[in-house]
Amino acid sequence: MSFASLGLSAPILKAVADQGYDTPSPIQVQAIPAVLEGKDVMAAAQTGTGKTAGFTLPILELLSGGERAHANQVRVLIITPTRELAAQIGESVITYGKNLPLRSTVVFGGVKINPQMMKLRKGVDILVATPGRLLDLYNQNAVKFKQIEILVLDEADRMLDMGFINDIKKILALLPKQRQNLMFSATFSDDIRKLAKGLVNNPIEISVSPRNTTVESVDQWIYPVDKKQKTALLINLINENNWHQVLVFSRTKHGANKITAQLEKVGLKAAAIHGNKSQGARTRALANFKSGEIQVLVATDIAARGLDIDQLPHVVNFDLPNVPEDYVHRIGRTGRAGASGQAVSLVSADEIKQLFDIERLIKQLLPRKLIDGFEPVHDLPESRLDTRPIRSKKPKKPKVGHRDGQRSGENARGHKPSSKNKRHTGSRNRVSGQSGNR
Ligand code: AMP
């Protein structure tokens, strides 16, 4: 299967070839023809599957015909939950559209609104936006929706998790009825399906399993270790194994800062990325990490979600996430695009419940390794695989203070996300079981 056979034209094929992609990923094989045909699409796909190109490439193809955007108008609106995702999609649009005379821009909160208003003045073919800032721009007449041809809702589940449902509903009500809709979500919970009902018409349903969570592409194991030894063990692992590019996950922002400071103290180049960091600091940290200037990036779960870092060799879970699905998202940062990666977790005795939950979710026991000098005094109990199916129950909401999702998500007007946020733990598991293109 080649990109050419999917119906894309020369300028786009050239941009794709320049990226070094030779074969379309499964989601691209399914999504590109469907979008080109003008169909609505509902896709269960996570970051790492190639979904961004899956919708961007055919959109660029469709846009190369048709009337250009008038003043303040937009032809394609891509809504995404976080600033990082918005910036990354914006970059992809530029990369894949570099041989086309199309205008695009990205808007998100946390930065000045005026430059964004200026960019929208002449109209843009593609606008990538986070929900709150988009509404602010609309309310100030900086963006108009009359010319919208296509709407993309990216990471819809995360958007609901982050309390954007009301903003989304408001935006949907403002759009022209006649349009093509593409909806992407890692999971399809009842709430997502409800949202989809009012959004997509007779959609092509696509489901691909996240290729980067398969055991073949990611080597996973844990190091049982005492809590107070974790930093020393992390430093030992990085130095002994010569890890040159490591993404470390911390459950809390405070933890991320502390780990970063401790790594810097021993001369390792590290930076933290979380919701309390300014947009500039986050963008800089990511760029420096990608260029190799920074060796260790320490991130909280939501700040890291969607980070587009190719073929990251090492992911370390400094602590285990409270929500087992976050473990899958975390290790999804490694072993991407067919490359193999390593995901290791430092697990202390008090994290046994999180470990059991993760092992139950991924349906395997994680191998354990010990490092001389770091054997735990507080024993980590043996795991026994819980093979009971995970029911679609609504788990307790994690404490806001322990996660930075809300704040790392853009909410330009300082709105507190809805207290009705719920994570749909059980349903995530169902995604991989969904049937393919129906
Ligand atoms: P995404 O799921 O959109 O975040 O994409 C994940 C990563 O895969 C990105 O870094 C893309 O550059 C890369 N990618 C997307 N499509 C392909 C492809 N067909 N071949 C190789 N890499 C790809």
Image (cartoon, helix red, strand yellow):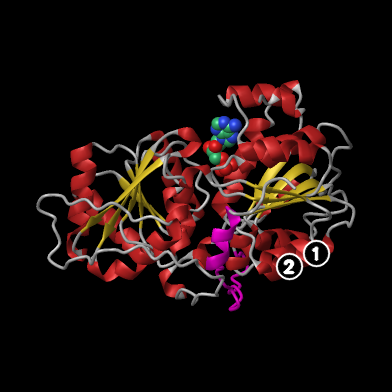
The quarter of the displayed image where residue 199 is located: bottom right
As measured in the structure, the alpha-carbon distance from the residue carrying label 2 to the one carrying label 1 is: 7 Å
In the rendered image, residue 175, in percent from the top left (x then y), is placed at 84, 58
What residue span does the magenta drawing correspond to?
411-432
Q: Nearer the viewer, residue 237 or 265?
A: 237
Q: Residue at x 67, y 21 (%)?
A: 14
Kindly tell me whether mark 2's CB lies below 8 Å from ligand 1.
no
The residue under label 2 is 194
The quarter of the displayed image where residue 291 is located: top left
Q: Secondary structure at mark 1?
A: loop
Q: Is residue 276 left or right of residue 352?
A: right
Quadrant of the displayed image that contains ligand 1: top right
In the rendered image, residue 70, in percent from the top left (x then y), is placed at 86, 43
The residue under label 1 is 198
Q: Evaluate if marks 2 and 1 touch, with contact meaning CB atoms under 8 Å apart.
A: yes
Q: Amino acid at mark 1?
A: Gly
**How many other residues sit within 10 Å of disc 2, few (<14), some (14-19) or many (≥20)?**
few
Q: Which mark is residue 347?
A: none
Q: Amino acid at mark 2?
A: Lys
Q: Secondary structure at mark 2?
A: helix
Vertical order, 139 against 308 (above or below):
below
Give the position of the N terminus as an image quadrant: top right
Kindly tell me whether mark 1's CB lies below 8 Å from ligand 1.
no
Q: Nearer the viewer, residue 191 or 19?
A: 191
In the rendered image, residue 300, in percent from the top left (x then y), is placed at 41, 59
Q: Nearer the viewer, residue 30 or 15?
A: 30
Q: Residue at x 43, y 63 (%)?
A: 324
In the rendered image, residue 371, in percent from the top left (x then y), is placed at 15, 49
Identify the main secondary structure in magenta. Answer: loop
Q: Is residue 8 left or right of residue 189?
A: right
**How many other residues sit within 10 Å of disc 1, few (<14), some (14-19) or many (≥20)?**
few
